[in-house]
Image (cartoon, rainbow, N blue to C red):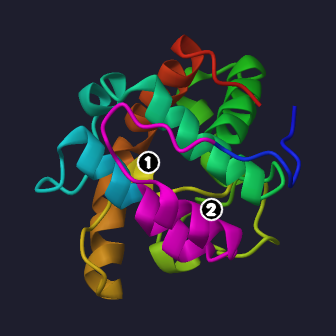
Amino acid sequence: MLKTEDDEVKLVSALGLDYSNLRDLLASQKWQEADRETAILMLRGAKREEKGWLNRESIEGFPYEDLHTIDQLWVKYSNGHFGFSVQKRIYENVKEHSEDESEVWPTFRYMVNWLKKGEKFQYSDLNFSEKAPEAHLPVVALFVGFLGTEIESESFEKQCAVMAGLGGVVFEAIGSRLLNCNIQY
């Protein structure tokens, strides 16, 4: 069930993370800043700030309460257009209708506009607006995140391109964790 404007998302964190800035960014529809804040929070929560990216183990250990809080904030402030549970629903649909397991991740990425045919994923290709395809955001948390407020586009894009190959593994872990936590949209 979609939350209404009157429903308040409880900012619950088993990790002691403060989700108020993420909530404020999403409420203001500052999608790119919210995407980066999501990555920062997830990296901090997974204790992977120095690595700058998430892996299967860090996602599998990420508390249900925190994934649920992040997801519900994205779902609420995008009116059900963005969020991990929205991504999970689309991913599972692709997986269910795919004959070739190796095509699931590329097909999903293409559907949510994280992949251009024949081209590498570039951070600058993302659409940080409400007109983006369903499930397009958040994306940075799935691949890589950088701490700090100033992010150089060129190095960020290079890092995203390098990490995009791990995206399927990390996304599978997030989907599995959401399933185990029974987070659904």
Residue 166: quarter of image = top left
Residue 29, magenta (yes or no): yes
Callout count: 2
Question: Is the residue under label 2 in contact with that under label 1 (CB below 8 Å)?
Answer: no
Report the Cα–Cα distance between label 1 and label 2. Answer: 20 Å
Residue 19 — which label?
none
Secondary structure of the residue carrying tag 1 is helix
Residue 88: quarter of image = top right
Please give the name of the residue rendered at 35% of the width and 64% of the height, measured from the top-left corner: 160
Quarter of the image with the N terminus is: top right
- The residue where tag 1 is placed is 142
Residue 131, magenta (yes or no): no
Range covered by the magenta-colored residues: 10-38
Q: Measured along the vertical axis of the image, is residue 19 above or below residue 168?
A: below
- The residue where tag 2 is placed is 117
Please give the name of the residue rendered at 26% of the width and 32% of the height, measured from the top-left corner: 58
Instruction: Residue 164: tell me if it is visible.
Output: no
Secondary structure of the residue carrying tag 2 is loop
| Residue 114 at x, y percent in the picture | 59, 59
Mark 2 residue type? Lys
| Residue 135 at x, y percent in the picture | 71, 50
Quarter of the image with the C terminus is: top right
The residue carrying pointer 1 sits among few (fewer than 14), some (14 to 19) or many (20 or more) residues within 10 Å by Cα, namely: many
The residue carrying pointer 2 sits among few (fewer than 14), some (14 to 19) or many (20 or more) residues within 10 Å by Cα, namely: few
Please give the name of the residue rendered at 82% of the width and 72% of the height, measured from the top-left corner: 131
175 or 77: which is nearer to us?
A: 77
